[in-house]
Image: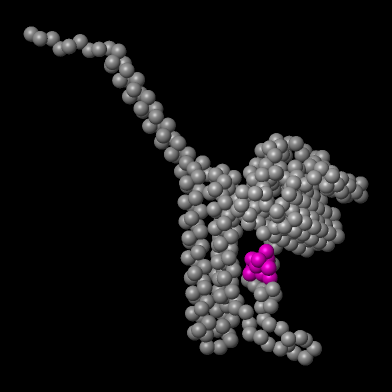
């Protein structure tokens, strides 16, 4: 009787090892997929998809608001119905604006993980989305016809302020038309002139902090915050110890800003110096005569501990890698420059002096 051929033991063990390795690889792949599903920031494609979905939904909502406003204007029978339709449209736009703000914040977080090209595309599309928002506002609150004011006044055109607005503040004008700028219910410093403000309490790094409509002020935020939103500053010095997320600075003139942050975005700045420690490339748009330098220290309490806790302690020289979204040529943008050593020292000296004056008064 013929015997079955003897089993080759080495080949059996090799197959067993191969099968075991394949099982381990499958388990690891499933684990990686689970991580990606739990945290889309680990996958650039997921970030882009999430952004595009949110952007399309917002665009659809803006088209609906504009269409409903046009229909309401044509069907309104009297001023009461016209005013009611306008208020309905404003309420709808406030809801859309909240979604735009949320997407803007998410974009700032995603851009830290994304390749530079994807981040630039997202920022450009966010700009287009804000322009669509402004057009929707114009549909809901159209400019009035020319009219003469009562005696003692002067002839005006309704909406003249909006028509005179520059591209730098069109969004602010649109928000003002919706009374969105009055919703100052979050932590922040607003509507101050000629003051030194020091926020030395333990700030909550889960909250945003706002600086709005400040003139000739020195502001020191000595704790960690989630994000900074600075708007409409004139001749101010701003020092923020640590920003766990992004810093958005808009409509700032003749000022000095010193921050440690994950990302800095500057819109509509003029003659302002930025002393920055950032973990990504600073972004400027529609800005002129701005300069960048490394962050300086005023030696505030627990500074090293706070910076290390938020991954902002090490200098990586990103402050000099500025992206100008309105300058697409390979040559150096004329809109920003590196601040020379003398001006860096002067900004640091003046800022320290103001901070020390405040401490001596306490």
Q: Does 287 lie within the magenta span?
A: no
Give residue 177's position: percent from left, percent from top: 65, 72
Q: Relative to 241, is 163 above or below?
A: below
Residue, x 50% and y 48% (percent of image)? 47
Give residue 203's position: percent from left, percent from top: 72, 48
Residue found farthest to the bottom: 151
Q: Relative to 315, is 7 above or below?
A: above
Give residue 238's position: percent from left, percent from top: 78, 52
The residue stretch that appears in magenta = 165-176
Residue, x 91% and y 46% (percent of image)? 360
215 sits to left or right of 51? right
Residue, x 48% and y 70% (percent of image)? 64
- The front one of 254 and 215 is 254
Give residue 21's position: percent from left, percent from top: 37, 24
Can residue 68 be seen in the rendering of this structure? yes
- The front one of 155 and 107 is 155
Can residue 110 be seen in the rendering of this structure? no
Q: Main secondary structure of the magenta part?
A: helix
291 sits to left or right of 245? right
Residue, x 55% and y 65% (percent of image)? 96
């Amino acid at each position: 009787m013929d015997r079955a051929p003897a089993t080759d033991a080495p080949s059996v063990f090799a197959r067993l090892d191969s099968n075991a390795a394949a099982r381990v690889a499958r388990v690891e792949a499933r684990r990686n997929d689970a991580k990606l599903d739990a945290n889309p920031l680990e996958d650039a494609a997921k970030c882009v998809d999430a952004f595009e979905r949110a952007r399309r939904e917002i665009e659809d909502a803006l088209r609906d608001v504009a269409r409903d406003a046009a229909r309401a204007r044509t069907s309104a029978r009297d001023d009461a119905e016209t005013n009611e339709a306008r208020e309905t449209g404003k309420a709808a736009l406030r809801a859309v604006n909240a979604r735009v703000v949320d997407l803007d914040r998410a974009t700032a977080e995603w851009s830290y993980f994304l390749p530079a090209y994807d981040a630039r595309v997202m920022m450009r599309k966010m700009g287009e989305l804000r322009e669509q928002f402004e057009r929707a506002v114009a549909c809901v609150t159209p400019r009035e016809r020319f009219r003469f004011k009562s005696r003692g006044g002067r002839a005006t055109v309704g909406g003249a302020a909006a028509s005179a607005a520059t591209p730098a503040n069109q969004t602010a004008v649109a928000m003002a038309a919706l009374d969105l700028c009055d919703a100052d219910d979050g932590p922040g410093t607003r509507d101050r002139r000629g003051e030194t403000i020091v926020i030395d309490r333990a700030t909550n790094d889960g909250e945003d902090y706002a600086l709005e409509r400040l003139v000739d002020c020195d502001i020191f935020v000595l704790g960690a915050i989630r994000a900074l939103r600075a708007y409409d500053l004139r001749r101010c010095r701003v020092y923020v110890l640590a920003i766990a997320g992004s810093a958005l600075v808009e409509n700032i003139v003749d000022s000095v800003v010193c921050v440690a942050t994950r990302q800095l975005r500057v819109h509509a700045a003029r003659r302002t110096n930025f002393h920055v420690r950032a973990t990504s490339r600073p972004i400027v748009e529609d800005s002129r005569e701005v300069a960048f330098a490394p962050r300086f220290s005023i030696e505030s309490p627990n500074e090293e501990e706070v910076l290390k806790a938020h991954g902002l302690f090490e200098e990586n020289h990103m402050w000099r890698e500025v992206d100008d979204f309105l300058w697409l040529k390979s040559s150096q943008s004329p809109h920003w420059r590196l601040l020379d050593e003398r001006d860096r020292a002067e900004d640091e000296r003046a800022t320290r002096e103001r901070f020390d004056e405040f401490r001596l008064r306490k």
